[in-house]
Image: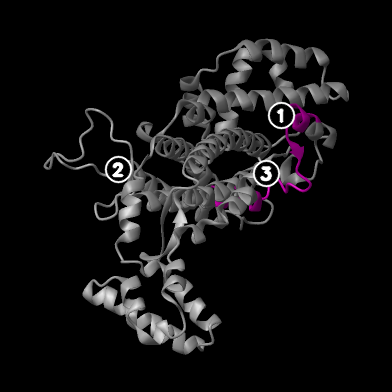
Amino acid sequence: MIPRYSRPEMTAIWSPETKFRIWFEIEAHALDALADIGTVPKSAAETVWAKGGAATFDIDRIDDIERVTKHDVIAFLTHLAEIVGEDARFVHQGMTSSDVLDTCFNVQLVRAADLLIADVDKLLEALKRRAFEHKDTVTIGRSHGIHAEPITFGMKLAQAYAEFDRNRARLVAARAEVATCAISGAVGSFANIDPRVEEHVAEKLGLVPEPVSTQVIPRDRHAMYFATLGVVASSIERLATEIRHLQRTEVLEAEEYFSPGQKGSSAMPHKRNPVLTENLTGLARLVRGMALPAMENVALWHERDISHSSVERMIGPDATVTLDFALVRMTSVIDKLLVYPDNMQKNLDRLGGLVHSQRVLLALTQKGASREDAYSLVQRNAMKVWEQGADFLTELKADPAVTALLSEAEIEEKFDLGYHTKHIDTIFRRVFGEA
């Protein structure tokens, strides 16, 4: 985790203090359940909660113990025993390290998902507001980077809204996928601990019991989680790339907000660069890159190995922290995005009316021309616009083969911009509902 790309709410989830507190709660809740079924004295559970619950765990002390034990969970349990005293002997009864590690990891992933879902909600709010603001702002749609046909800028933002709305549903599903708990002991057989303990701990932590944990919670769940983060990151990059293109000098239909005192270049004082969306493109690459090792973690040996452990200690914090930062930054970009309708109109007019070529093509076929002949008629006039800078409407009116089928009034009618935006309301209802 790099502070430059981190927010405190998400980094706190992955702090040692949070981790050890969750470890303690797992152990203490398990002890409560063991006490309820008569395996350990209730007084022991009460003592552990009283002393451990009020304690501030000494991270340096735990690290010192781990340097000797070479085992992080044992180091924590040893430190907890120093705090609790004699009753600490009842802690971790019938459990194995993975019960603590995997359940804690899933608690952290669930909490991270909650923050990410909240981030997406804010981005959706910004996208919806700006989409309605520019619902009728006509701009050119592009295919292959080339002018195609008119759309509206609001339609662009509505598309992004629909995509992130799907991403929200994916994050909710990913959260549910990892919201499982394992307190099943060595090799997951419950031989030394009652399944009721797992059920109790799961309920207290807002999780559900893992059906078969085999000592570790199956990593297909985590693969799906991190793959989902990668998809969300890809959507961020798609939107960021769109803005970067629109900010190009030759286009300049939209632009990142450039704040007072901001500098675009150390050498060229005139520069206003799309630094935020370029940054988001890079962050998206990082998050996507963490999906593959999560998938490779699925194939563990037999009932357990720890080849996944080092991977998850890195990608757990890094992927969630980075995506959290990226979503918040993207929301700010959309919220403050500068939009230039006049430039959109200028760009729309640059090709001398060629954006209406399909309407003319269809009109000719409706008047009896074959599609092949109609295409040739329209294309030969369109090429004059490309190559000679001619005006498309003027060329069509001067072409006898065209005017033999269409009157001047019929040709002019095909140049109506409103024709291309007549279903924008339908699209908005599909995306945002009747409201």
Find the distance from the CA under tag 1 to the CA under tag 2: 41 Å
Amino acid tagged 2: Val
SS of the residue under disc 3: loop
| Residue identified by numbered label 1 | 205
Q: Nearer the viewer, residue 430 or 41?
A: 430
Q: CA distance from mark 1 to mark 3?
A: 39 Å
Display coloring: one colour
Q: Callout 1, which amino acid? A: Leu
Residue 200, given in percent of the width and then of the height, sits at 80, 29
Q: Residue furthest right?
A: 37
Residue drawn at 29 percent across, 49 percent down:
252
Pinpoint residue 362: horizontal percent, then vertical percent: 51, 77
Which residue corresponds to the image point at 25% horizontal and 44% vertical from the top-left?
273
Circle nearer the N terminus (1, 2): 1
- Given residues 299 and 334, the one toward you in this image is 334
| Dot 1: element | helix
Q: Which image quadrant is residue 125 in?
A: top right
10 Å neighbourhood of mark 3: few (<14), some, or many (≥20)? few
289 shown above or below 268 = below
Q: Is residue 50 magenta?
A: no
Q: Nearer the viewer, mark 1 or mark 3?
A: 3
- Residue range (magenta): 200-229
Disc assigned to residue 275: 2
Position of residue 8 relative to residue 146, above or below, is above
Determine the CA span between mark 2 and mark 3: 37 Å
Q: Nearer the viewer, mark 1 or mark 2?
A: 2
Horizontal and vertical percent for residue 332?
42, 34
Q: Is residue 165 above or below residue 117?
A: below
Q: Viewer-proximal residue, 270 or 6?
A: 270
> Circles 1 and 3: CB distance less than 8 Å?
no
For the residue carrying disc 1, how many other residues have a C-alpha within 10 Å: few (<14), some (14-19), or many (20+)? some
